[in-house]
Image (cartoon, rainbow, N blue to C red):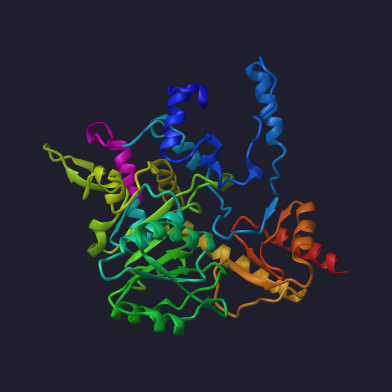
């Protein structure tokens, strides 16, 4: 991109000096060397478009795409109706940008409004936003939202996704909040330790439902104690699971957050994804990100506008209560179209298949010595022991075109099953694992 940026080399060097750096590559110091291109793509000079396209395709073919996927841990392969991609690929959606001028942005504003309405209904909350990067960012923003002058401690369950916890740590490093982790006990949050940790200084408690291990937390048991201390309850949830489970609103959560990728977004090598965030009415004015409201114009026609807060609230740097200002509207549109295409019954069927197929695989794995680690209710993920070396097992599966579960220790695997996995695929997995034991 260097040749397309109008800044001179001297200007770029001056900017680097201002932030205490000397070289451009120091900006990417946190990116592992193993995934960084060190000396360009090594293409010959003077190639035409066709030749370059062929070479790039050849490079892309080195990527491994598995026939069967038994791994989730925050990113899930679901069926996406063909109409979803057809609709969201329309030029008027793809080229739309930030809808600050309502007069010329009614289409994109309505799409955001519909998305927010669906998320609020799905989570059982009163208001939802748009423009949150991903589920981890949504959780971190929710924790920051709860901060008060005398309440600057966040209790985070150790059963929350590790990457979400790290994102929250990054935010709290900057805003001065203290994180206290609550330990895991038998695959769920240790509620006794959580009860003891509650105090007047606690601003919020974050639980994940289902949690990182796939297990369901007993939110109803701890909720009264959380609110007795005037702390906020944040639930990070899987949107597909909400088709079968109690919504965060039913569980008396103050804030619901989560990763919207299962709602019609492909895995896409890790993004872009979509964070969703919804709150009860009393927190509505604290909700970060873009919020669209419905009103009427001077002629009485329905109209849509950005509402409740000005855009400038999010660009006041260190004085802002939130730093969300990206345009995630196209991902939100995709989620809205997916939910509209699936409908209530379709989403419930998807969730039902996820759970029932996971139950089948768990039972079959147990028969061959991959024993369930936790005796807890679950949705579509679960942890088993591994009677052999985990890495050798996963490598053997990979050689057969199967992405096995996520290794979470030397002898444990986190498995995931979605509606896209057939019985034949599960039976083939079991057969390969049995042959490896012979």
Q: Would you identify the image quadrant in which residue 431 lies?
A: bottom right
Quadrant in the picture for the C terminus: bottom right
Q: How many marks?
A: 0
Q: Is residue 209 left or right of residue 412?
A: left
* In the depicted structure, whether residue 124 falls above or below residue 334: below
Q: Would you identify the image quadrant in which residue 415 lies?
A: bottom right
In the rendered image, is residue 221 in sight? Answer: no
Whether residue 376 is in magenta: the answer is: no
Whether residue 108 is in magenta: the answer is: yes
Q: Is residue 99 left or right of residue 184?
A: left
Q: Main secondary structure of the magenta part?
A: helix
Taking depth in this image into account, of 329 and 203 the one nearest to the observer is 203
* In the depicted structure, whether residue 408 falls above or below residue 184: above
- Image coordinates for residue 213, horizontal then vertical, percent: 57, 69
- Image coordinates for residue 318, horizontal then vertical, percent: 31, 50
Taking depth in this image into account, of 100 and 139 the one nearest to the observer is 139
In the rendered image, is residue 109 in sight? Answer: yes
Taking depth in this image into account, of 348 and 44 the one nearest to the observer is 44
- Image coordinates for residue 70, horizontal then vertical, percent: 66, 59
* In the depicted structure, whether residue 337 falls above or below residue 377: above
- Image coordinates for residue 157, horizontal then vertical, percent: 47, 72
Q: Report the residue at 62% width, 67% height from top.
A: 358
Q: Report the residue at 40% width, 80% height from top.
A: 197
Question: Which residue is at the far right?
Answer: 438
The residues colored magenta run: 99-115
């Amino acid at each position: 991109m260097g040749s397309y940026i109008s800044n001179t080399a001297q200007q770029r060097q001056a900017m680097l000096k201002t932030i205490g750096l000397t070289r451009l590559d120091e900006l990417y110091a946190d990116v592992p060397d193993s995934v960084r291109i060190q000396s360009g793509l090594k293409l010959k000079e003077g190639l035409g478009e066709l030749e370059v396209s062929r070479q790039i395709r050849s490079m892309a073919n080195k990527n491994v795409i598995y026939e069967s996927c038994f791994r989730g841990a925050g990113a899930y392969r679901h069926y996406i109706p063909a109409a979803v991609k057809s609709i969201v690929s329309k030029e008027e959606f793809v080229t739309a940008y930030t809808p600050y001028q309502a007069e010329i942005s009614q289409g994109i504003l309505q799409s955001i409004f519909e998305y927010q309405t669906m998320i609020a209904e799905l989570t059982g909350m009163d208001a939802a936003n748009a423009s949150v990067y991903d589920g981890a960012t949504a959780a971190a923003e929710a924790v920051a939202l709860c901060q008060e002058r005398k309440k600057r401690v966040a209790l985070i369950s150790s059963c929350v996704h590790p990457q979400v916890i790290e994102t929250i740590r990054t935010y709290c490093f900057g805003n001065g909040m203290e994180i206290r982790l609550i330990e895991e006990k038998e695959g769920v949050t240790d509620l006794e330790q959580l009860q003891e940790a509650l105090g007047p200084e606690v601003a919020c408690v974050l639980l994940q439902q289902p949690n990182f291990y796939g297990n369901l937390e007993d939110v109803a048991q701890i909720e009264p104690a959380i609110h007795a201390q005037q702390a906020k309850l944040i639930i990070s949830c899987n949107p597909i699971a909400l088709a079968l489970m109690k919504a965060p609103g039913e569980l008396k959560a103050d804030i619901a957050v989560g990763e919207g990728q299962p709602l019609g977004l492909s895995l896409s090598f890790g993004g872009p994804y979509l964070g969703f965030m919804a709150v009860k009415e009393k927190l509505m004015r604290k909700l970060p990100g873009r919020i669209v409201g419905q009103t009427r114009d001077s002629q009485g026609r329905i109209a849509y506008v950005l509402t409740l807060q000005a855009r400038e609230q999010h660009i006041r740097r260190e004085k802002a209560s939130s730093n969300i200002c990206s345009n995630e509207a196209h991902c939100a549109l995709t989620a809205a179209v997916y939910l509209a295409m699936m409908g209530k019954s379709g989403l419930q069927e998807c969730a039902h298949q996820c759970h029932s197929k996971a139950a089948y695989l768990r039972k079959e794995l147990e028969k061959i010595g991959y024993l369930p680690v936790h005796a807890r209710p679950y949705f579509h993920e679960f942890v088993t022991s591994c009677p052999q070396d985990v890495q050798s097992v996963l490598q053997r599966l990979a050689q057969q075109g199967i992405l096995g579960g996520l290794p979470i220790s030397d002898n444990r695997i986190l498995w995931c099953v979605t509606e896209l996995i057939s019985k034949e695929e599960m039976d083939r997995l079991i057969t390969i694992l049995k042959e490896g034991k012979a």
